[in-house]
Amino acid sequence: MQLFQQLDARTFKHRVDARGRISHVNDEWLDFAAENGWPISAADVVGRPLMEFIGNPELHYLYGLLLARLRAGRGPVRYQYRCDAPDCRRFMQMVLQFDPETREIEFASKILSIKRRAPQAILNDTHAHDDGSLDVCSCCKRVNMAGRWTEIEDAVVRLNLLGREDLPRINHSVCQDCVSELSDLAHP
Ligand SMILES: [Zn+2]
């Protein structure tokens, strides 16, 4: 465990102001975005509403509840999530904290551990798309297989996608387990 933390001890931080707009991102946050195929500058994100970056309506709602809980002084909030890359599973921890002086909420995340895997082409956005789509949970990165949420490696085998040139699109969704967890955090 200690080894993993020495591997990448960075803390990725962004803050949201009282109007729900991003007011700050740290250099580590920008570096991590670039490393994950999203090369942007602070000027590209600061001043934009946080909710613009959360694509799923159910998550909009849950994050709205979480932010309200924090602003009511009932924080901090901690949860674990996944931020995977095609060639690894990344197990992350997020801590949300409200600063009553500035009225800002800080999102601080760290990598708890990384598990390498064979690269999953479907997570690489440069591949050609077929007509299909796969619901992937934005929080735990599992895939919806007819109501059963499973790891992407298993879904790729079961859907016979190995070696295919055209792959389904990824649809950013949220699974029921993660909805329940975030909902419990929002209503402690
Ligand atoms: Zn999930």
Image (cartoon, rainbow, N blue to C red):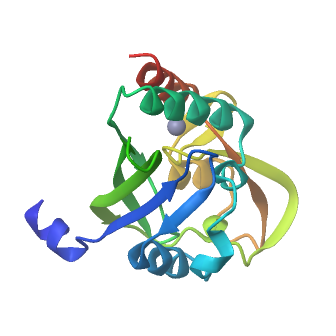
> Is there any visible trace of residue 92 in the rendered image?
yes
Query: Where 161 falls versus 31 (above or below)?
Result: above
User: Which of these two is toward me, 165 or 171?
Assistant: 171
The image shows residue 29 at horizontal and vertical percentages of 45, 71
Quadrant for the C terminus, please. top left
- Single out the residue that lies furthest toward the top: 188
Quadrant for the N terminus, please. bottom left
- Single out the residue that lies furthest toward the right: 131
Name the residue: 45% across, 47% down.
105
User: Which of these two is toward me, 101 or 168?
Assistant: 101
Name the residue: 60% across, 48% down.
155
The image shows residue 147 at horizontal and vertical percentages of 65, 27
Locate residue 97 relative to residue 4 in the image: left or right. Answer: right
> Is there any visible trace of residue 175 in the rendered image?
no
Q: Quadrant of residue 173?
A: top right
Q: Quadrant of residue 137?
A: top right
Name the residue: 55% across, 62% down.
23
Name the residue: 32% across, 36% down.
76
Locate residue 143 relative to residue 130 in the image: left or right. Answer: left
The image shows residue 2 at horizontal and vertical percentages of 9, 64
Query: Where 152 falls versus 4 (above or below)?
Result: above
User: Which of these two is toward me, 48 or 95?
Assistant: 48
* Tag count: 0
User: Which of these two is toward me, 85 or 63?
Assistant: 63
The image shows residue 121 at horizontal and vertical percentages of 62, 71
- Single out the residue that lies furthest toward the left: 2
Query: Where 90 falls versus 78 (above or below)?
Result: below
